[in-house]
Image (spheres, helix red, strand yellow):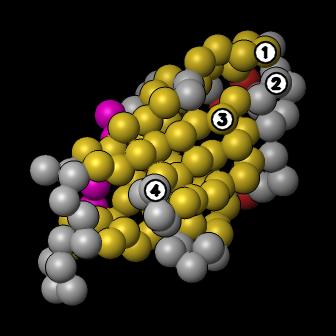
Amino acid sequence: QVQLVESGGGSVQAGGSLRLSCAASGIIFSINDMGWYRQAPGKPRELVATITRGGSTNYADSVKGRFTISRDNAKSTVSLQMNNLKPEDTAVYYCNAVILFSLTSSRDSWGQGTHVTVSS
C-alpha cells in the first residue's frame, strides 16, 4: 500500500515562509508527475504546482515567483518552498503523485493534507 505523508504546515504571518515536504512510501515501481494542490474553505481544490520526473515545473499564476517546487527521485519526495506568503494562501495543502506499480499500472495518489494559515 502506497502512502503520501506531508509535513511542514503551520501558521505564519504575511511575508513569511514555510516549506512543505511529502514522502511516498510503499511498494513503488516509479513515480511520474508529483505536485501540490490546495483547498481553501468553501472553495474547490486547485493546482499550486507540479513537477515531472525530469524536473519540468508548472505553477499557478497566483504563486509564480513566490513558490518553488522540487523533488528527489531517489528518495521519492517532493517539496514546496513558499516565500512571501499572503493571507490568500491559507488553505489545506495536499501532496499528489502519479504512482507506477508496473509499466502498465498506475494510480493517482493523495496525501492527507497539511494546514497552512497566513495571518495579516
Mark 4 lies on residue: 75
**Which of pointers 3 and 4 indicates the residue nearer the eye?**
4
Mark 3 lies on residue: 19
Mark 3 surroundings within 10 Å by alpha-carbon count, few (fewer than 14), some (14 through 19), many (20 or more): some
Q: Which mark is residue 13?
A: 1
Mark 2 lies on residue: 16
Check disc 2 and report its element: helix, strand or loop.
loop
Amino acid identity at mark 3: Arg
Can residue 31 be seen here? The reply is yes
Magenta highlight range: 108-112
Check disc 4 and report its element: helix, strand or loop.
loop
- Is mark 1 in CB contact (under 8 Å) with mark 2? yes
Residue 79 vs 7, above or below: the answer is below
Mark 4 surroundings within 10 Å by alpha-carbon count, few (fewer than 14), some (14 through 19), many (20 or more): few
Is residue 27 part of the magenta span, yes or no? no
Residue 2 vs 83, above or below: the answer is below
Between the residue at mark 3 and the residue at mark 4, the CA separation in whole angstroms equals: 17 Å
Mark 2 surroundings within 10 Å by alpha-carbon count, few (fewer than 14), some (14 through 19), many (20 or more): some
